[in-house]
Amino acid sequence: MIYVAVCDDETKIGAEAEHALIEIFSNMQVEHEIDVFINGEELCRHMNEGAHYDLIFLDIEFAKDEINGVEIGRLIREAYQNNNVSIVYISREKDYAFQLFEIRPLNFLIKPLEHDVLEKTVKTYMQIAGLWSSDFAYIVGRDTRKVKVKDITHIESSDRKLILHFVDGKTDVFYGSLKEVYQEQLKKFDFLFIHASYVVNFDYISAIRYNQLSLRGNTTPLPISQNRRNEIRESYFSIMKRRRV
């Protein structure tokens, strides 16, 4: 599942982009959800409440009394500490390259949006996100199930059961070793083994403290084991530094 946001105060542009993206993703046989916003405040409020997006098409120019697209991009990268979401800027003006450099957008598109340009941008995103979109495999009974790594917020161990927590709030349960799952499938995707009972996805961490951390959309902080605290903080900042580079 790919979660997409389109944010543009021109309702016609937003509707046309949504329609084109639905057609593009459907032709690619990619499951998707698309939210459309008419101003940046609405998008920011939605993300603040825990909404997750993989790809955002973001207008630059809004009304003078509203936050503009450049400022929204800075909020996403700096305030929300979200370096994973791909941002595609859309505008009627071409003179924004320098301002956008530090936000690291995936692309910059000029209105009106052309279908083939949108399709090429989506395919570029899919290629870049290919590794991140890899499957996580696990066994329930006699069935082997596969889910996208990017949709997992964390895994919880309870007795011999492992509980998968997904970005949409759903869960699934299977038997296994949390240590083996982490080492064999999740460590390479920047998951952190914070406690004997918890492995968390770096991209959903909203705050980290010495002895616990918080995940977006999860009101209960998760503990960090005493013997892992220094290692987790070092790993967290190492990932952050690597992704910013």
Image: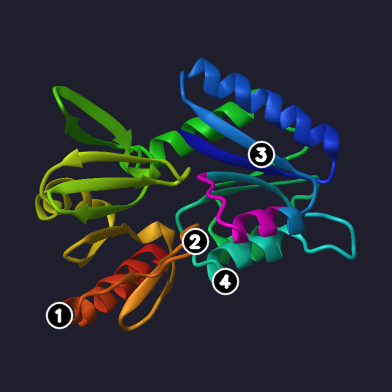
Q: Is residue 136 above or below residue 195?
A: above
Q: Which residues are magenta?
A: 43-54
Rounded to the nearest whole Å, what is the CA distance between mark 3 and mark 1? 42 Å
The secondary structure type at the circle numbered 4 is helix
Q: Nearer the viewer, residue 119 or 221?
A: 221
Measured in 3D between alpha carbons, the distance from the residue under mark 3 to the one under mark 4, in whole angstroms, is 21 Å
Image quarter hosting the N terminus: top left
Upstream in the sequence, badge 2 or badge 1? 2
Q: CA distance from mark 3 to mark 2?
A: 18 Å
Residue in the image at 26% along x and 74% along y = 224
**x%, y% of residue 228?**
18, 76
> Which mark is nearer the camera, 1 or 4?
1
Residue 37 x, y percent position in the rendering: 74, 45
| Residue marked by disc 2 | 82
| Outermost front residue | 159
Q: Secondary structure at mark 1?
A: helix
| Mark in front: 3 vs 2 | 3
Whether pointer 1 and pointer 4 mark residues with C-beta atoms closer than 8 Å, the reply is no
Along the polypeptide, which appears first: circle 3 or circle 1? Answer: 3
Residue 79 numbered mark, or none: 4
> Which of the 4 quarters of the picture holds residue 41?
bottom right
Looking at the rendered structure, which numbered label has been put on residue 63?
Answer: none
